[in-house]
């Protein structure tokens, strides 16, 4: 137990900040993978019958991928601030700064994938209304952007 206490007194800040990086990158990335995968399946089904709609289907599929990018950016910027002598309070603060983009990014990407699937249905039946489906999917992005901004502000306040 003394070894654990000694470890956290010396490297606790780096540990918690690194844990924040992991959450920001992995959790938002998992959400993006789910959303992009779901939308990709719908796009593949659509493109079997209507291959000329590839560009529009690709746009709908790409939308849920941005949350993973937001998590990566926050994770990378946090990683740049991690040193072996980072104090525990700052490390925990970086951890909490990474939570919004990780958690909200996961749910936002997952649900944006669902909306993108529905957008594929609009594209299949009424291609002239494609932008309506894209706008509906983009609206889900708003919350991922807000979480990214909150994480970015919190991260910059720590340093």
Image (cartoon, helix red, strand yellow):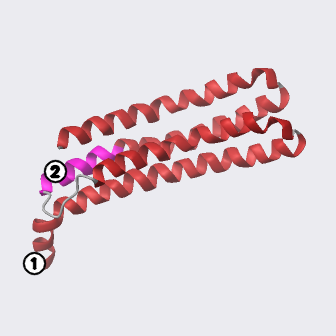
Look at the numbered disc 1 and give the secondary structure of its residue. Answer: helix
The label on residue 135 is none
Instruction: Tell me if 36 is positioned left or right of 44 in this view.
Output: left
Report the front residue among 88 and 84: 84
Residue located farthest toward the right when viewing the structure as drawn: 49
Q: How far across and how far down the image is residue 126, in percent?
A: 82, 24
Q: Considering only order in the chain, which callout, 1 or 2, is on the residue closer to the N terminus?
A: 1
Q: Residue at x 31, y 54 (%)?
A: 20
Q: Residue at x 45, y 53 (%)?
A: 27
Instruction: Tell me if 151 is positioned left or right of 87 in this view.
Output: right
Q: Which residues are magenta?
A: 87-99
Whether residue 102 is visible to the viewer of this picture, yes or no, is no
Q: In the picture, residue 17 is in which quadrant?
A: bottom left
Instruction: Tell me if 132 is positioned left or right of 109 in this view.
Output: right
Circle 2 residue: 90
Marks 2, 1: nearer the viewer:
2
Q: How far across and how far down the image is residue 2, in percent?
A: 9, 78
The prevailing secondary structure element of the residues shown in magenta is: helix
Look at the numbered disc 2 and give the secondary structure of its residue. Answer: helix
Q: How far across and how far down the image is residue 58, in percent?
A: 70, 40
Q: Is the residue 75 above or below the residue 107 in the image?
A: below
Report the front residue among 83 and 118: 83
Circle 1 residue: 2
> Residue 62 magenta-drawn?
no
Q: Residues within 10 Å of mark 1 (few under 14, many from 20)?
A: few
Whether residue 129 is visible to the viewer of this picture, yes or no, is yes
Q: How far across and how far down the image is residue 107, in percent?
A: 50, 43
Q: Residue at x 40, y 31 (%)?
A: 146
Quadrant of the image for the N terminus? bottom left
Quadrant of the image for the C terminus? top left
Distance CA(mark 2)–CA(mark 1): 23 Å
Q: Residue at x 39, y 42 (%)?
A: 101
């Amino acid at each position: 137990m003394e070894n654990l206490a000694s470890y956290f007194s010396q490297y606790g800040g780096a540990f918690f900040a690194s844990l924040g990086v992991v959450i920001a990158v992995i959790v938002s990335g998992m959400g993006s993978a789910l959303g992009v995968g779901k939308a990709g399946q719908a796009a593949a089904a659509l493109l079997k019958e209507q291959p000329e709609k590839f560009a529009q289907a690709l746009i709908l599929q790409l939308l849920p991928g941005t949350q993973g990018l937001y998590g990566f950016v926050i994770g990378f910027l946090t990683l740049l601030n991690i040193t072996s002598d980072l104090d525990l309070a700052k490390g925990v603060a970086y951890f909490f700064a990474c939570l919004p983009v990780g958690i909200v990014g996961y749910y936002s990407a997952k649900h944006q994938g669902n909306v993108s699937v529905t957008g594929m249905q609009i594209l299949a039946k009424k291609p002239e209304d494609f932008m309506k489906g894209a706008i509906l999917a983009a609206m889900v992005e708003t919350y991922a952007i807000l979480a990214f901004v909150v994480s970015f502000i919190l991260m910059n306040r720590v340093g």
